[in-house]
Amino acid sequence: MAYSTTTVAMLLVLAAAVAAAASTTTTGSAAHVNTSCVTGSVGATVSIGYGGARASAGAGLSLGSGVYRATCPRAEEIVRAGVERAVAADPRMAASLLRLHFHDCFVNVSSCSFLFPQGCDGSVLLDDKPPFVGEKTAVPNANSIRGFEVIDAIKAELERECPETVSCADLLAIAARDSVVVSGGPSWEVEAGRKDSHTASLQGANTNLPAPTSGVATLVQKFTNVGLSAKDMVALSGAHTIGKARCTSFGARLSGAGAVGAASKDLTFLQSLQQLCSVSAGSALAHLDLATPATFDNQYYINLLSGDGLLPSDQALASSPAGAVPGTDDDDDVASLVAAYAFDAPVFFQDFAESMLRMGRLAPGSGGDGEVRVNCRVVNIFS
């Protein structure tokens, strides 16, 4: 889509006007603009979007199966092949691509819905382009999320096959599924039809994404905030059966915090972490699942029962007392779910796939306000 110089100038002026409006009071019955929506929690300015005050995400777009069957029949084949190549070259990439989808979907800022994207809309892929500030520099994302070059390569191939057809948000959802499958995990039919946002939210990424030090109550609340359950939280945490984490993300575990009992196996596990991290200044990477690090299975939950969860937020799941977590009920008791998944891999696979579908439905962009980006890193006006 081509825009004239005059149109671009008008859009940038509109963006500046909306930003200025955030610090003023409207007349009549209107309230103050929520200034927390335009400043990040670490003090950085949050962009209101390349295209000004366009609302780029609503719940008005329906997702479905087989969306690209007629318009881009080879879409899923192209994504699958790209994921397989990437994981063959770097097995860790499977976890990285899965994580990209999660970090995209969880930025769901309902209080700022007029200015900011919500849910699975490809916002995590947008590069900073001054004065625009995206989500890549948010605390949970900086020096953490990766795989952008893989997405770029797959998107370029999709554009050659069927230009301006497959959204970056859908690409992330399909790539996440294929990353699980190529690692030995379950498959599911990805629902597609998302549009890509024109905007991103640094504050949303800083606020909404769970931290590796979170306790169970906080984790449940983070998931509840976006409409997911405690059961979804426990099932989706199973994604940590693949991938790695830096020493800086599990410092609390190095002192034995969160360990279950004092079993010799757990002490050996903690000592191995202490040795790894003592010489790396926190930059070393440890497998989230030491037993089967590249295989998507239920070993993650078995590890938790043994006290061998890497992240404090992981190990906390196994030590949550029944009935003590707000927002849970008998069916969603966190510790009981951990035990159930540890002893029954098919149940975990089924629940994980269903929870991935529910997460993928989080506030998809509305058809009239989003777009299909040609380049996942920038909106089309700058492509």
Image (spheres, helix red, strand yellow):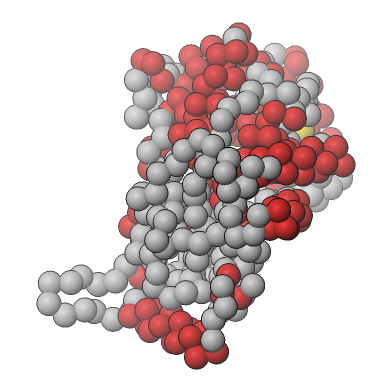
**Can you give x and y, in whole percent of width and height, for residue 16 in the image?**
43, 83
**Residue nearer the viewer, 327 or 10:** 10
- Residue 292 on image: x %, y %: 78, 22
List x then y, in percent, for residue 178.
68, 35
As rendered, which of 51 and 308 lies closer to the eye? 51
On the rendered image, what quadrant is the C terminus found in?
Answer: bottom right
Q: Is residue 275 left or right of residue 26?
A: right
Q: Residue furthest bottom?
A: 6
The structure residue drawn at horizontal position 61% and vertical position 75%, both measured from the top left corner, is 382
Question: Dividing the picture into quarters, in which one does residue 133 lie?
Answer: bottom right
Residue placed furthest toward the left? 28
Pick whichever, 335 or 201, lies toward us: 201
Query: Which residue shows up at 68% across the image and 42% down it?
Result: 74
Figure check: 224 above or below 200: above
Left or right, 192 with respect to 145, comes to left
Instruction: Say whether residue 78 is visible.
Output: yes
Q: Answer whether residue 277 is visible to the viewer in this image.
A: no
**Within the image, what quadrant is residue 217 found in?**
top left
Q: How many marks?
A: 0
Q: Quadrant of the N terminus?
A: bottom right
Quarter of image, res 180: top right
144 shown above or below 267: below
The residue positioned 40% from the left and 79% from the top of the image is: 19
| Residue 77 placement (x, y as % from top left) | 71, 39
| Residue in view at x 34 percent, y 76 percent | 22
- Residue extending furthest toward the top: 343
